Image (cartoon, helix red, strand yellow):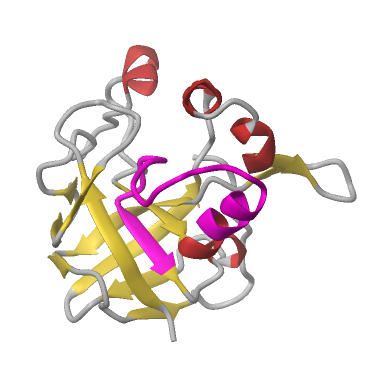
Amino acid sequence: MAVVHRVARDDTHRFSKTPVAEIRLLAGLGVEGDAHLGERVQHRSRVAVDPEQPNLRQVHLLSLERLEDLAAAGFDVAPAALGENVLTAGVDLLALPLDTRLRLGDEAVVRVTGLRNPCAQIERFRPGLLARLVGRDDEGRVILQAGIMAVVETSGTVRPGDPIVVDRPAPPHRRLERV
């Protein structure tokens, strides 16, 4: 069964977030009290390019399984350390198609917009970690493994232990790209 393992937010633009007992997702905006809340892009590097871009990175989701893989490779990475708002368990986030909807708990619904693009901050956080989160497939295509991004479609409160219901869009499915 897919569940929310941890939730986090941070009201400043720091790399890591702070684990909390619950987060409130606001439709069209993101995580209440988080620095990335807003209809328009909030990531500083993207604001510098075009502050009028829509915010397709309102919620960052990462899987507990990814953290466990990193731990097995010798990296000490705690929940929320990579800046995720929602740490999931039991769902292969990277395999989801574009526009998949995830019901988090009783009310909240997010729509998957793409892959998180790991940046140099990850390498500064833990040397060697960036190479573990960016790879190549058999055809030489870049594979990003730092989680997924989503926008909030339906507001709601999300807590650890909440179930996650996956609703894939109708085929044909489009694979996730960097957003």
Is residue 73 part of the magenta span, yes or no?
Answer: yes
Q: Which residue is depicted at the point 32% across and 20% down?
A: 44
Outermost residue to the bottom: 1
Residue 165 location, quadrant: bottom left
Is residue 39 part of the magenta span, yes or no?
Answer: no
Q: Nearer the viewer, residue 71 or 143?
A: 71
Outermost residue to the right: 138
> How many discs appear?
0
Q: Which quarter of the image is occupied by the N terminus?
A: bottom left
In the image: residue 157, left or right of residue 64: left
Q: Which residue is depicted at the point 19% across and 69% down?
A: 159
Q: Which residue is depicted at the point 46% across and 68% down?
A: 100
Q: Is residue 142 visible?
A: no
Q: Nearer the viewer, residue 14 or 140?
A: 14
Please report the bounds of the magenta region as a residue range. Answer: 67-88
Compared with residue 96, is residue 86 higher up or lower down, i.e. above or below? above
What x and y, as percent, mark residue 149? 41, 49
